[in-house]
């Protein structure tokens, strides 16, 4: 037992109620530097000071935790929104996951099995205890200081998320069912906007970032017709075909889904910042599988193509070159059992080979008129006859 004088009275503590500085920082889930700042600012007082050492009571640390949990900030500071309720169990789990993922070069495939294994011993829905920090560092064979500092970095990045960001875990009811059914689905999805869109029939419209004038017009017209047919158009918010697809849906008064290859609090390309916000404000949806702490990598964009394909019933490639990322999405779609639509004009184009290769694969279809596409969707029970009965014109979208 240890006795200390506080507020002119003597209070007795058992040894398990006392924490040295490093233990207190771990208990609060913050860095040692942050702990020192709290003491300096008078927001946390040690019960005892010795040469080069501070001792804190569990009672005071628990009070500090409670204060953090009660914080609900909707401030706008340094051009970044501050997210509310940072200590919610789901958000805590996501912070823990993306902290561990950062030690695996942001690879879900490498990180998630380890995360699940550690989750049998550690409750990631709560701030980590000293013993839990040790469990993790022993498993990853890293220093506890490295884990603590990385955890704080990730937590601070989560605080920059917009207040309306929702986190969907793969076993959550709002997590896209079609995405849940594919292999290597992302453990967490970040979303802004109308989640109900994920329960609708979705078709991706993808293609070149630098389309021809005719290709851009085709993508715009096709996306408007799909939207008017009751289909939700998805695209990747990239330049070119993606931008045309999103803008066409919005211009028709229809919602659209953007599946982005950056963290949800980032915009790429920068010129689509306004479009990204319009999609959210006009009953659409923006989703990302990348944590706010992640630095954007080139391979993020092919990964998001796999996610976009998975939430869609089909993918339409409007215009694409031999090395286009749209072909990666076609590969994902066929592997996932989704349909792929290729315009007849692309098949007839002697300058590119990929359309004639893909059209021979199971699940790939060619089309020339919008009703041809709708008929195939109906035959595959993706849309009902009532959609075809809406009187969509037999427009020849893809005649050169």
Image (cartoon, helix red, strand yellow):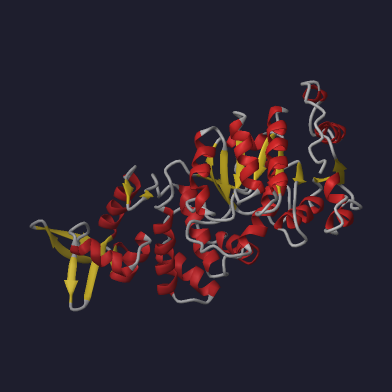
Residue beneath the point at 73% across and 41% down = 218
From this viewpoint, which residue is outermost toward the left?
A: 8
Q: Does 171 sit left or right of 10 as displayed?
A: right
Query: In front here: 245 or 203?
Result: 245
From this viewpoint, which residue is outermost toward the bottom?
A: 51
Q: Position of residue 202 (x, y in %)?
A: 70, 38
Residue beneath the point at 56% across and 35% down = 194
From this viewpoint, which residue is outermost toward the right?
A: 360
Q: Does 122 sit left or right of 184 as displayed?
A: left
Q: Does 42 sit left or right of 57 as displayed?
A: left
Query: In front here: 212 or 223?
Result: 212
Q: Is residue 335 above or below residue 366?
A: below
Query: In front here: 68 or 2?
Result: 68
Q: Position of residue 258 (x, y in %)?
A: 60, 44
Residue 312 in which image quadrant: top right
Residue beneath the point at 33% across and 70% down = 22
């Amino acid at each position: 037992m240890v006795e200390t004088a506080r507020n002119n009275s003597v209070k007795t503590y058992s040894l398990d109620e006392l924490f040295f500085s490093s233990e207190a920082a771990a208990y609060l889930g913050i860095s040692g530097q942050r702990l020192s700042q709290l003491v300096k600012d008078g927001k946390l007082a040690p019960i005892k000071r010795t040469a080069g050492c501070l001792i804190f009571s569990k009672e005071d640390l628990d009070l500090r935790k409670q204060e953090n949990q009660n914080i609900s900030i909707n401030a706008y500071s340094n051009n970044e929104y501050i997210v509310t309720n940072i200590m919610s169990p789901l958000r805590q789990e996501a912070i823990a996951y993306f902290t561990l993922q950062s030690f695996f070069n942001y690879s879900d495939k490498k990180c998630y099995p380890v995360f699940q294994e550690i989750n049998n011993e550690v409750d990631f829905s709560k701030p980590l205890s000293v013993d839990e920090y040790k469990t993790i560092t022993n498993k990853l064979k890293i220093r506890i200081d490295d884990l603590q500092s990385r955890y704080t970095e990730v937590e601070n990045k989560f605080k920059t998320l917009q207040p309306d960001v929702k986190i969907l875990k793969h076993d959550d009811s709002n997590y896209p069912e079609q995405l849940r059914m594919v292999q290597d689905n992302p453990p967490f999805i970040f979303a802004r906007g109308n989640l109900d869109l994920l329960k609708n029939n979705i078709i991706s419209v993808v293609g070149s970032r630098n389309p021809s004038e005719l290709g851009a017009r085709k993508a715009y017209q096709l996306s408007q017709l799909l939207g008017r047919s009751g289909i939700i158009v998805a695209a990747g918010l990239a330049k070119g075909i993606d931008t045309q697809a999103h803008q066409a849906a919005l211009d028709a008064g229809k919602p659209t889904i953007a599946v982005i290859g950056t963290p949800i609090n980032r915009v790429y390309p920068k010129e689509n910042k306004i479009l990204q916000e319009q999609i959210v404000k006009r009953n659409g949806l923006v989703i990302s599988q990348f944590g706010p702490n992640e630095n954007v990598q080139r391979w993020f964009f092919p990964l998001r193509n796999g996610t976009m394909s998975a939430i869609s019933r089909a993918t339409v490639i409007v215009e694409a070159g031999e090395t286009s990322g749209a072909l990666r999405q076609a590969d994902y779609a066929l592997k996932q059992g989704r349909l792929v639509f290729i315009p007849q004009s692309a098949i007839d184009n002697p300058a590119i080979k990929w359309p004639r290769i893909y059209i021979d694969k199971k699940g790939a279809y060619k089309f020339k008129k919008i009703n041809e596409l709708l008929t195939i969707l109906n035959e595959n029970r993706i849309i009902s006859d009532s959609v075809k009965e809406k009187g969509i014109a037999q427009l020849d979208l893809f005649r050169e």
